[in-house]
Every structure is written in structure tokens, then in C-alpha cells.
Image (spheres, rainbow, N blue to C red):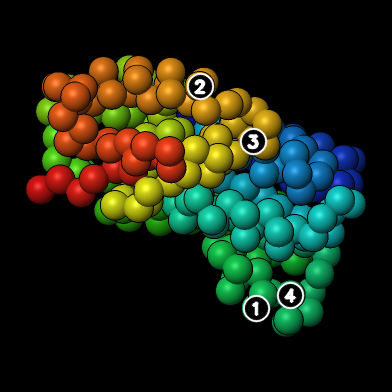
Amino acid sequence: MKDKIILVVDSDKGAALNLIKVLKAEGYSTIYVGTAQEAIDTCIKKIIDLIILELNLKDKDGMVVIDTIRSFTNTLPIIVLSSRSNVESKVMAFDTGANDFVTKPFNNYELLARIRNQFRYMKDETKHLFINGNLTIDFDAKTIFINGVEVHFTNFEYKIVVLLAMNLGKTLTYDYIISHVWGKDGNDQNGLRVFMAGIRRKIEKDTRSAKLVRTDIGVGYRMNKVS
């Protein structure tokens, strides 16, 4: 479990720290944030394996976090751990994209079982292995293979490749990629081009062919579907 990173999102820092103690005792690594915006930024900038989310946040409703994360990934498990107990909140959370909902107060053993269940479910899902031509992404191991050989990608390069893969065949604008990888004002188009050049050198035998990744000049980038 030591390779699993859980993001805990709760404006109540005391409650969050108590939960973090339980998670660390089970061998999980943790990151704590207290606001919705911090949660979104963390998911964009870091590789997270699971989110435990309180809906009652000070800056924005937790539903915004779920909706935003689901706009760029469907594979990140989200467990809502909230003081809201009404049926409407539960239905809305699930409809927005939450994987599970636990009402406070909660039993530690039950929550840990639900976390293990999410990891077990995601491990069994074939979508955690993405294959397109000679490109393979192992989402569990966070590794990329070209022609069956593991190739090292930096954290930001990995995030860009995954973002393009999860939107296969769709052109993503420069601003869209920047906002989802670095966050608003986190980089510029010239910086993105540098990263894309590095990615192309690693995944394309001929960088001029654009077989896997194509530039739509003046618009953005897309990953082509390759048989």
C-alpha cells in the first residue's frame, strides 16, 4: 500500500489529521488540503491514487471538485466522506461522479474496507491499461511503454500523455492542456511546446510523422487512434 497516495480534502483540519493517522497506520501515503481549489490544483499537479472528500468546504462546494476532476479523468476513485446525510446529496454525488459515499460519523474499519475495495476494483478494470498502437500506459504503475519497452517520462510529460490518451481522437486546446496539467497561469504555450517536443522524441520514431500525436496549428494537440 505504500505506493498509494490518498488526497484528504476537508476544511476541518483536526478531523482530517485524525483520518490521516488511520490511513498512515495502514501504510498509505497522504496529502492534506483544506479547500476545493487546492484539491483541484493538487490533482492536476500531482499523481493521486484516491481522494477522500468532504463536501462542506469553505471556498466551494465539494461537488465542484468531483465535477472538475471528472472533466479530465474517469479513473481516479473519489470517496465522499461527509456530514451530509440526506438522500439528495448522495444521489447528486454519485451522479456527478463519486465512486462511494460514507456519512460522518464513520467506522474506521468500514472506511478502510471501502478504500481497499476501490483499489481492488480499479486494479481489475481493463481501462487501467491503455493501448494505442505501440503506446501502452499502465495507470496502476504510472508507466509508459513504447513497443513494450518502458520509457521514462517526467511527471508533467506523463500527465500530458495521459490527458491526450483519455481524450483519444479529440483536439485539446493549448489552454485546456495547460489548465489541466499545471493549473491556471501555471505555464504558457511556449513552455507547453517544449514539453510536447520532449514527448514526441520519446514516442515517435520519426518526430515529423505525427503518427501518434498531431499538432493542430493555432489550436492545440490531439492523440490519434492507431491500429
Q: Would you call the spot at circle 4 few (<14 residues within 10 Å), some (14-19), or many (20 or more)?
A: some
Q: Are marks 3 and 4 in contact (CB under 8 Å)?
A: no
Q: Which mark is residue 183?
A: 3
* Kind of residue sitting beneath label 4: Ser
Q: Give the residue at mark 4.
A: 89
Q: Give the residue at mark 2.
A: 190
- The quarter of the displayed image where residue 215 is located: top left
Label 3 vs label 2, nearer the camera? 2
The one of 204 and 190 positioned closer to us in this rendering: 190
Q: Which mark is residue 91?
A: 1
Q: Residue furthest bottom?
A: 87
* Kind of residue sitting beneath label 1: Val
Q: Is residue 112 above or below residue 212?
A: below
Q: Are marks 3 and 2 in contact (CB under 8 Å)?
A: no
Q: How many marks?
A: 4
Give the distance between the C-alpha atoms of the residues marked 3 and 1, in whole angstroms.
29 Å
Q: Are marks 1 and 4 in contact (CB under 8 Å)?
A: yes
Q: Would you call the spot at circle 2 few (<14 residues within 10 Å), some (14-19), or many (20 or more)?
A: few
Residue 97 in percent (x, y) is at 56, 65
Instruction: Indicate which disc, 4 or 2, sits on the residue closer to the N terminus.
Output: 4
* Kind of residue sitting beneath label 3: Gly
The one of 189 and 69 positioned closer to us in this rendering: 189
Residue at 16% over, 29% down: 209
Q: Is residue 136 above or below residue 202?
A: below
Instruction: Indicate which disc, 3 or 2, sits on the residue closer to the N terminus.
Output: 3
